[in-house]
Amino acid sequence: MNALAAFHLRAAAIYVALGMVAGIVMAAGQHFEYGPAHGHLNLLGFVSAAIYGLVLKDRPDLAATRLAKLHAILAHLGLVVMTIGLTVLFSGDVATGEPLAKAGSIVVLLGGLAFIALVFKATTPRTA
């Protein structure tokens, strides 16, 4: 398996563990206001990162591109910043949390656009 696919799959495993722990802590403390952060961590962290890894495992030629490396940086950095921002925001610190959540969301969007480009590159018929 190529290194970038392995990175995404390992990150997905870490994100799902963090998401489960966060969900348990959130429920045990009756702090359901953190639900959006928990949900984003599981969906963008676990599900999306696993999909990224599986796509790049199937297409190692794509994993070797600068676009794939840029996508990985944007997707994971954006997720971490956004999740921290959402957690801080829903803890009541709007002045700190909102800018972090917004910045992280924009970085995640840029990562998503990079992934769209990778998918289109992967699914465009090759000429002989």
Image (tube, rainbow, N blue to C red):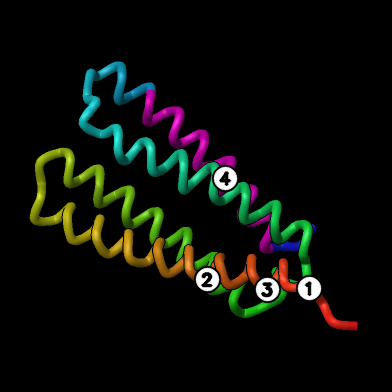
- Magenta-drawn stretch contains 20: yes
Q: Quadrant of residue 87?
A: top left
- Mark identifier at residue 60: none
Predominant secondary structure, magenta span: helix
| In this view, the mark in front (3 or 4) | 3
Q: Most extreme residue toward the right, as rendered?
A: 128
Q: Quadrant of residue 127?
A: bottom right
The residue pinned by badge 1 equals 125
- Mark identifier at residue 12: 4
- Front residue of 58 and 74: 58
Mark 3 and mark 1 residues within 8 Å of each other at the beta carbon: no
In the image, what residue type sits under mark 2?
Ala
| In this view, the mark in front (2 or 4) | 2
In the image, what residue type sits under mark 1?
Pro
The residue pinned by badge 2 equals 114
Q: Is residue 87 above or below residue 107?
A: above
Q: Crowding at label 2, few (<14), some or many (≥20) Cα neighbours within 10 Å?
A: many
Mark 3 and mark 2 residues within 8 Å of each other at the beta carbon: no
Mark 3 and mark 4 residues within 8 Å of each other at the beta carbon: no
User: Alpha carbon of mark 3 to alpha carbon of mark 4: how far?
Assistant: 23 Å
Find numbered disc 4 in the image and state the secondary structure of the residue it sits on.
helix
Find numbered disc 1 in the image and state the secondary structure of the residue it sits on.
loop
The residue pinned by badge 3 equals 121
Q: Say left or right for 112 vs 4.
A: left
Q: Is residue 128 above or below residue 96?
A: below
Magenta extent: 4-23
User: Alpha carbon of mark 1 to alpha carbon of mark 4: how far?
Assistant: 29 Å
